[in-house]
Amino acid sequence: MFSALLILWTIFWHVRVIRATCKAVISVVSDARTHEEEDLFTMSYGLPLNGDGDEKCLSMLNAVEETISRQLRACKAPSSKRRVLEDIEPLQDNLDLEEGFCKALLCRLRFRKHFFHALTCMRRPQGRGLELARKHIASCIIELESILKSADFLLSGACGTSEDGIEDRTTASGRPPIGFDASLNSRSAAPTPPRAIKILSWKRAVEYFVKLLHDLDAICSYSLDPLLEGVLRFVVQFQKSQPDLVARAHLQLLLVQDGKLYGRDPIFAVIVKAAALPEVTKNHDIQKNEYILQLGQLVINMLKILCTNAAWQRRKLGKILQDWRVIYVQLDIAFRNEFGEFSSMLDDENICVKIFRHILNWVEEQTYWIASRFLKLGFELDLYSPTEYCMVYWYIYAVLIKLAEKTHLRLAVSSGTVKRKGKKKKDSIKEVAKESRIPPAILFLQCHICLAQGLTMMLAALRNELMLFQTPSHFNTERERFIQHFELLQKACVPDNISYPSFKESTTYARFSTLVMYNYFKDAQKIAKEIKSSFSNDPERLAELRRLEQVAEHNVVAVNVICRLGAIDPSLKVSFEFSHHPYFASAVVKRS
């Protein structure tokens, strides 16, 4: 009798903690307002998720866990102490299976408990619960390993067998779940999208949780960098693992809380750091300017967009480009109205002049960063065909040139803000020489620029001399495809004076002879080797440099082969693959 009550009590509180977990997940996704990107509703179809007493589920689950733990300890007692079991009623009929049964039950209870704890800790304001959440996530991963190990026991003849493969089972034992109606999902869902969701098999469900936990752990291990550049790099890197909706919603709510970065850093203070302005600027009254307030909202919107899936992110980034361009024009007009038509001739001694100039440069830099992200996402989404690579790399080159220019200006301003007080005259020449060197961050961008320029010229030469990669479309012209891919950039004038005629003008006369004369891949290879030491403490950028170097190395060889044999060997076939880098293609030359 006791064992039956204990099992029912365990199931009851297990279900309660699952319901509380579902409520926590729906709350996160709803607060982040990201459910629409996956075409999901946060409705529960009439099922109550706000159960009375759910707040007690963890304390009661701890009590159940302790009871089952005592049962397990009794099972492990030596044979001389087996009489202990006489005082404890087994949880199932076969005494020999009691230990395995208790272990299987315990790891599931503990997983649910730690998972709910992790979700709760991650919602604490200003990232205060991230360290504790990581401990619970680590415990979840351990319990999932135990759950996987219990599969063999539950599949044994004593606990039930099934002829179906484990890939199709929704439970570890293969038996139908008790008290769960799988058809409720299809009966409650609407006949139009979003429709009923297919229930994952037990194996795929475990894999899903493993992936989700690793993604949540990556978020919790983030250092909460106050520099916006660091934030953007982290989000872009995090998105490479293709996290699911739940992880991305948690990341968004961590980054943006109460209109502040991490709920603690005012957005204007974040902009001040990003624009390389002195710290005292963050208390300046200019932050009350309506256009500065709008700029702050644009930064918040950008962070939220970067936490969405790739397709949604690309559409939204393309649209907010116009907002960033408009705010630049508005700030520029406000600057001229404030200081007159000759404001460009004023020096930076006036703090307001300094703030406006630096912010205007930073807004442009950010606009070109968004444009580059927009273009690169097209490769992730397979939106470009090989016949369009030439125009895409040409546009990437044009955007990266402007991005490098604005970034260089910001870095120069940042180094110039450091007062060289107490410097001797004999040190001034050394300082000037040091400051005249191109910063590694700009050379890093220059490496990308060389690859984009090299691929543009290589593809243009192949089109012009071998008539490759120019298959005419029966549905639209090259000009129309150019507009389709870059319409949002063109509307925002990013960059200025960039159009289809300018693309044709710059690529029409590309030849193999110019490829040999101006081998941009060799330049990229050289730059990558030179700046590796500058990023020895940055594993992410070091890995990127290795990828860029591989692309450059393979394309140097490809260019040599094409230029030597292209005109005399009609059987030569050229294709492009992304085996070394997700955005920059490597040429593959073969004979047919």
Image (tube, helix red, strand yellow):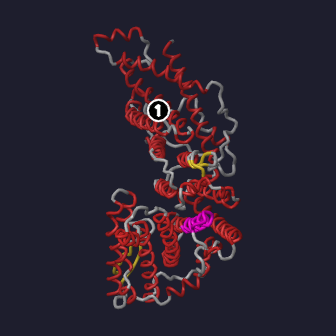
Position of residue 443 measured from the top left corner of the image (x, y, whole percent): 40, 70
Q: Is residue 74 left or right of residue 281?
A: left
* Part of the protein shown in magenta: 348-368
Residue 417 seen in the current view: yes
Residue type indicated by callout 1: Phe
Give 541 or 230, whichever is nearer the viewer: 230
Q: Residue shown at 54%/27% (left/top)?
A: 14
Q: Residue shown at 39%/61% (left/top)?
A: 541
Q: As displayed, is residue 33 above or below residue 489?
A: above
Q: Residue shown at 60%/48% (left/top)?
A: 260
In terms of secondary structure, where does tag 1 sit?
helix
Position of residue 128 measured from the top left corner of the image (x, y, whole percent): 52, 38
Q: Is residue 278 rendered magenta in the image?
A: no
Q: Residues within 10 Å of mark 1 (few under 14, many from 20)?
A: many
Q: Is residue 366 rendered magenta in the image?
A: yes
Give 191 or 231, whichever is nearer the viewer: 231
Q: As displayed, is residue 44 above or below residue 65?
A: below
Task: Report the label total.
Answer: 1
Q: Quarter of the image for the C terminus: give it.
A: bottom left
Q: As displayed, is residue 92 above or below residue 219?
A: above
Residue 168 seen in the current view: no
Give 512 or 348, whichever is nearer the viewer: 348
Position of residue 274 measured from the top left corner of the image (x, y, whole percent): 53, 59
Give 391 or 306, whichever is nearer the viewer: 306
Residue where numbered disc 1 is placed: 111
Position of residue 583 measured from the top left corner of the image (x, y, whole percent): 45, 68
Label the magenta part by its dominant secondary structure: helix
Q: Is residue 342 left or right of residue 14?
A: right
